[in-house]
Image: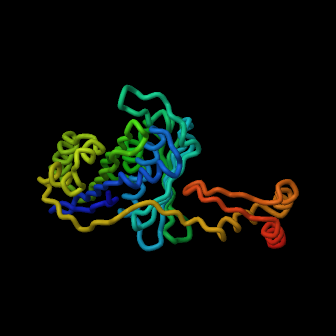
């Protein structure tokens, strides 16, 4: 099943819509991190909104990083997205699996935790990155991101995110809806949008039922006379490389590298995002020691 996001705008050009189908992307996240059902749901939701935000707010080689640090058993969650909607995601403990709220309802809020903050850092290739911060309210991701947009970016935003995990821990359906109200929106627009959102079924249920993003837009937002302005294929990516890992190792300093050489004779580094393993042998470490300060 193809992962993609449609971008649409209403006739009055006062509301923009992003609707994504990300089932295979979240399955890949599950495969990489061997995550629990709740871990897959949490990381899948975060990756989906990060992807849509990348499409909504970035250009060219810009990027954004969303971090949730709610002190839950899943630890810190981080997603990084680029302007094309491609994303990478990780969690400190993706195998954590809090007890479900009730049968069929995963407790993502407990996995993430509610005692902390979320941050959004946008690298816009300027002198300083844009940094936004807000408190975690529910830990359910969607509500927290909508709260972030309202208080940190002063943009009324509606967000629905869903991941449906099957009994064998495979991903049955995943996707998201991301709607932003533009400054010239009328009171009538806002009322109509509120009513439309009230009628929405869970997005994972809609996708599991066979609806495409285009059909979701048509079924629930037709009265806005929307026009689809772009369709973007999205997915996972990781930009780690041996060179970047080596630079990171050199940054820990000569003394620490000498200790690693003496105690282990090699360094083994696993990328948090894609789990690729990089091994640096004795000669590699000696070269790094010579280059390190």
- Looking at the picture, the colour scheme in use is rainbow
Left or right: where does residue 277 sit relative to residue 153? Answer: right
Q: Where, by quadrant of the figure, is residue 185 drawn?
A: bottom left
Residue 232 in view in this figure: yes
Instruction: Identify the residue at image location x=41%, y=71%.
Output: 59
Please give the name of the residue rendered at 26% of the width and 57% of the height, measured from the top-left corner: 17
The answer to which of 205 and 49 lies nearer the viewer is 205
> Residue 230 occupies which quadrant of the picture?
bottom left
Vertical comparison of 281 with 159: above or below: below
* Marker count (numbered): 0
Percent across and percent down for residue 94 are: 54, 43
Quadrant location, the C terminus:
bottom right
Q: Residue furthest right?
A: 262
- Residue 200 place in picture, x, y as percent: 22, 42
Q: Residue furthest top?
A: 102
* Residue 293 seen in this snapshot: no
Q: Give the quadrant of the N terminus.
A: bottom left
Residue 264 is left or right of residue 72, and the answer is right
Q: Position of residue 269 (x, y in %)?
A: 68, 57
- Please state the horizontal and vertical placement of residue 264, each as a whole percent of the image: 82, 55
Residue 13 appears left or right of 33: left
Tell me what residue is drawn at x 27 percent, y 55 percent.
181
Residue 14, above or below 169: below
């Amino acid at each position: 099943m193809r992962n993609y996001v449609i971008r649409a705008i209403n006739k009055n050009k006062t509301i923009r819509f992003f609707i994504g189908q990300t089932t295979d992307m979240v399955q890949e996240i599950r495969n990489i991190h061997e995550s629990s059902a709740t871990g897959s749901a949490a990381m899948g939701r975060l990756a989906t909104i990060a992807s849509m935000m990348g499409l909504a707010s970035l250009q060219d080689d810009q990027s954004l990083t969303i971090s949730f640090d709610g002190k839950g058993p899943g630890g810190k969650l981080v997603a990084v997205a680029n302007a094309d909607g491609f994303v990478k995601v990780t969690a400190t403990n993706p195998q954590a699996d809090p007890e479900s709220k009730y049968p069929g309802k995963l407790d993502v809020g407990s996995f993430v935790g509610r005692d902390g903050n979320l941050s959004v850092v946008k690298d816009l290739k300027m002198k300083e990155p844009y940094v936004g911060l807000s408190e975690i309210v529910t830990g359910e991701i969607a509500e927290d991101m909508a709260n972030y947009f309202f208080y940190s970016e002063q943009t009324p935003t509606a967000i629905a995110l869903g991941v449906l995990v099957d009994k064998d821990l495979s991903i049955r359906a995943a996707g998201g809806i991301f709607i932003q109200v533009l400054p010239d929106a009328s009171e009538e627009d806002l009322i109509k949008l509120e009513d439309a959102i009230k009628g929405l079924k869970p997005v994972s249920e809609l996708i599991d039922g066979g609806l495409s993003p285009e059909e979701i837009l048509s079924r629930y937002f037709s009265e806005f006379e929307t026009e689809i302005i772009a369709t973007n294929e999205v997915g996972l990516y990781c930009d780690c490389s041996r060179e970047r890992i080596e630079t990171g190792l050199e940054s820990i300093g000569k003394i620490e590298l000498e200790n690693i050489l003496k105690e282990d004779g090699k360094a083994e580094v696993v990328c948090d995002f894609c789990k690729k393993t990089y091994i640096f042998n004795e000669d590699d470490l000696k070269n790094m020691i010579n280059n390190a300060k």
